[in-house]
Image (spheres, helix red, strand yellow):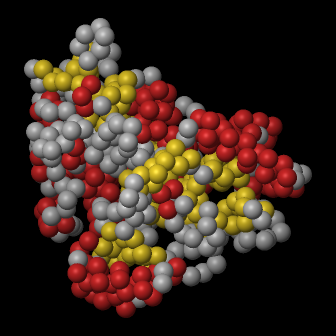
Amino acid sequence: MKKAFDEMWGDWGGEDPRGPYVNFAAWLEDISNEDLNLRKQAAEHIFRKTGITFAVYSNEEAEERIIPFDIIPRIISGKEWDDLSEGLIQRVNAINMFLSDIYGSREIMKAGILPDDLIYSNPQFRLQMTNINPPHDVWAHICGIDIVRTGANDFYVLEDNARTPSGVSYMLEDREAMERLFPNLIEKHKIRPVEHYPDALHRMLRSVAPNNCGGDPRCVVMTPGPYNSAFYEHSFLADHIGVELVEGHDLFVRDRQVFMRSTNGPLKVDVIYRRVDDDFIDPLMFDPNSMLGLPGLMDCYAAGNVTIVNAPGTGIADDKAIYSYMPEIVKFYTGKDAKLPNVETYRCREADSLKYVLDNLPELVVKLVDGSGGYGMLVGPTSTKAQIEDFRKHLIAEPHRFIAQPTLALSTCPTLTEKGLAPRHVDLRPFILTGSKGVEIVPGGLTRVALTEGSLVVNSSQGGGTKDTWVVDDIVEGA
């Protein structure tokens, strides 16, 4: 694996900072490590007091933790961000067209671009959604696209998250913490804002209300409840959007319409931003044992009387085997090459790829096609021989469940550690909103950082943390 590109220095330890970091590097020279550590402690106090938590699941129980936050920002130039945005918009548009197609006329399968069994055998494919048209033909209203960087101009999509993408609350809380801790520093940089995300989200939700809603659409956030790992985010978003946070038992169905119980009597609901997985949203349509959803919800949806954000069935776009076809998917629907390339990917369901992966396991990253959160994956270079051999057995037994990728030298970003500033690997999750009036992206997104030295796993569930992401204008380009 080649040496990692550093966001601040190009090469870690270089003499001159890169353009986006020029002003920040000058500020950094004038602040002591003691002061930085005091600010770090203040940030931890803010997060603990605010209750910014997530759950980590073990074999025994779920543990609630404060999200780790690093006070050294990740800085991206305006030009870099604008180029990224073009690729993100193209990709999300293609994802929406792909979803509309596979649940409709299935032209991409007729054209032989995708194998039929990759769709029909996929556990995230919802046959119940066939020929159901979401209001305004928007399927993936909220996408989180994971981006990695390996060089000055080398950005790749690592994963697509179109089911129930999480993390946007951390993006907003990170920015608020930085503004409280470093107000003078913030003023010296022309940082594009992210604070308007809740307003943008609310506008998008209202824009996709059913055509027959009549009047001001009522939107709600639907949560599985306080025991869900992302419950903090569910309540955070409902509060900041200014809508009700509901569970399935707070709603009921009458005359193929959804209503919310309230002290003022039943209130009609037009848009449900659901953070409940497909299997559990309607026991009459999906898992009959679900106690989390609303019986009859899908009948209301099929009748065009309520919008579900994101639409049921969007999870198939998260599948990592589908991901491997995204360049072809983008080309098929847009007629143009993908502006954001994929990471090279080996489909273990194919015999030649499986042989290559088995022969090179110590050098590869292997993932479950339907995995998330850093679970169920092998990072070959950091795994023991025993772990590799154990994983090999699973791979041989069910090759169709896995894809493999080369171990990339993910870019690093200066991070405050006990020994001072040190490089730590990062990725980036921008959040893309698609409504009836088009696509909107809040500049930046969530930077996730692998806090353990040498680790490439940035997921909070695996010991990762977050950073504020600055998109700055008026910087020295090309430095």
Question: Residue sitting at 31 percent across and 10 percent down?
Answer: 263
Compared with 51, 214 (above or below) is: above
User: What residue occupies the far front of the structure in this picture?
Assistant: 60
Say which quarter of the image contains residue 207.
top left
State left or right for residue 128 relative to residue 294: left
State left or right for residue 306 relative to residue 450: left
Question: Residue sitting at 32 percent across and 48 percent down?
Answer: 163
The answer to whether residue 445 of the structure is visible from this angle is no
The answer to whether residue 222 of the structure is visible from this angle is yes
Question: Residue sitting at 25 percent across and 10 percent down?
Answer: 265
List x then y, in percent, for residue 124. 22, 56
List x then y, in percent, for residue 199. 48, 28
User: What residue occupies the far right of the structure in this picture?
Assistant: 30
Question: Residue sitting at 27 percent across and 87 percent down?
Answer: 352
Say which quarter of the image contains residue 117.
bottom left
Q: How many numbered callouts?
A: 0
List x then y, in percent, for residue 309. 30, 37
Say which quarter of the image contains residue 152.
bottom right
Q: Could you say which is closer to the camera, residue 109 or residue 294?
A: 294
Q: Quadrant of the C terminus?
A: bottom right
